[in-house]
Amino acid sequence: MLKGKKIVLGITGSIAAYKSCLIIRELVKRGTEVQVVITPAGKEFITPITLSALTQKPVISDFFSQRDGTWHSHVALGLWADAMLIAPCTASTLGKMANGIADNMLITTYLSMKAPVFIAPAMDLDMYAHPTTQQNMERLKGFGNHIIEPQSGFLASGLEGKGRMEDPEKIVAALDLFFEKKDLQGKRIMITAGPTYEKIDPVRFIGNYSSGKMGFALAEECARRGAEVTLIAGPVSCKISDVNTGITIHHVESCQQMYDAAMKAFPQMDAAILCAAVADFRPTEVADQKIKRVGQTMDIHLVPNPDIAAELGKMKREGQTLVGFALETNDEQQNAQHKLEKKNLDFIVLNSLRNEGTCFKSDENQISIISSEGQKDYEKKLKADVARDIIDELSNRL
């Protein structure tokens, strides 16, 4: 979401100034236009020539050009920018910003800034923990600035961290999150993800190869776009990135546990996306001890599990949207269309095991979205990008 944005990057006199090059690289990679404003002390740690080469723009440090006396307008910069990022930001600069001491180009630009301001502190632990520094940060937060706390990776309000500047990738991720479109703001969305395991005995189960990557990607995309997400996850190793705080995870193992959690959560939801690969059957009985190998065969009697999609389709009320998934190996469109109608889904996401390098455990997927309006086919792409396509479709229906 940073593509086309204009960012003023303020650099101060910190040993972490070299990391500003990594920040610029990440911003430029995302299609951002970057204008560097550096303090005199900052130039002692990194040269304007290096920064100018990365941004393709002259670096601004002084009020006037040393060669021809051209005035650098801090007011114009304040109107030009979509955001200002000060990284690294020393304790000295924090203090000047908090108290309006406009003795260099960076501070005057900050005081003229009309756009949101993000601050990434960088100093030793004692300076960071000092009450004066903490007071200055609290004051800046009160002015509406966003402090990217060290070692947190998101827009924090607490005092966690150890003083060093946050990693460049996480700083840029915080900016990206801020500008992400919020078309799902205020919406509550339930997502099921991963496999279910149906126990045979204490050490064996019936399951499948689902990794949960698609469901977790959907949860991340919904949260980035402002939704409050309830993620019901089977046994997976996936983790939610620490920049997404709008996701509540409920861990389950069996289909019955997922069914119970989904039935409880769904009435409060605006939408549900049923991405989990749920076992259709479970053993009639579960042995309480490991079954020993006796003879040449073993019979396991199975009974049907609850059909989560069908039950939610029955209880769906007006204003709710229900999305299903269909993983097929043959007659894909026909089977998906049947499932769409039978289970009262608003649309269904079809993928096929015949598409090599997609589905289970893969980082990529290739889908079609089928609804009463017809079928949309998509190219093979990363699951994070697939999630964006699916949530675009969902957003149009909410």
Image: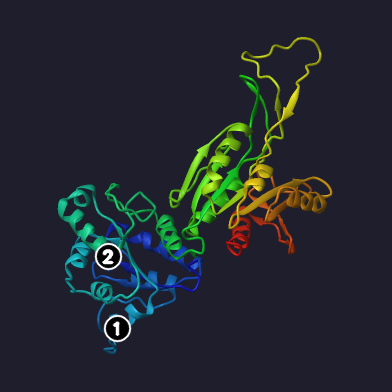
Q: Residue at 28% across / 47% down in the picture? A: 162
Between the residue at mark 1 and the residue at mark 2, the CA separation in whole angstroms equals: 18 Å
* SS at badge 2: loop
Q: Quadrant of the C terminus?
A: bottom right
Q: Residue 19: x percent and y percent?
A: 37, 59
Label 1, residues with CA under 10 Å away: few <14, some 14-19, many ≥20: some
Q: Toward which corner of the image does residue 20 lie, by quadrant?
A: bottom left
Q: Residue at 54% across / 56% down in the picture? A: 221
| Label 2 sits on residue | 12
Q: Residue at 19% across / 48% down in the picture? A: 126
* SS at badge 1: loop
**Can residue 166 be seen from the camera position used here?**
yes
Q: Residue 94: x percent and y percent?
A: 22, 62
Q: Toward which corner of the image does residue 302 lie, by quadrant?
A: top right
Q: Amino acid at mark 2?
A: Thr
Q: Toward which corner of the image does residue 194 lie, by quadrant?
A: top right
The residue closer to the viewer here, 265 or 255, is 265
| Label 1 sits on residue | 72
Label 2, residues with CA under 10 Å away: few <14, some 14-19, many ≥20: many
Determine whether 188 is above or below 13 in the image: above
The residue closer to the viewer here, 219 or 88, is 219
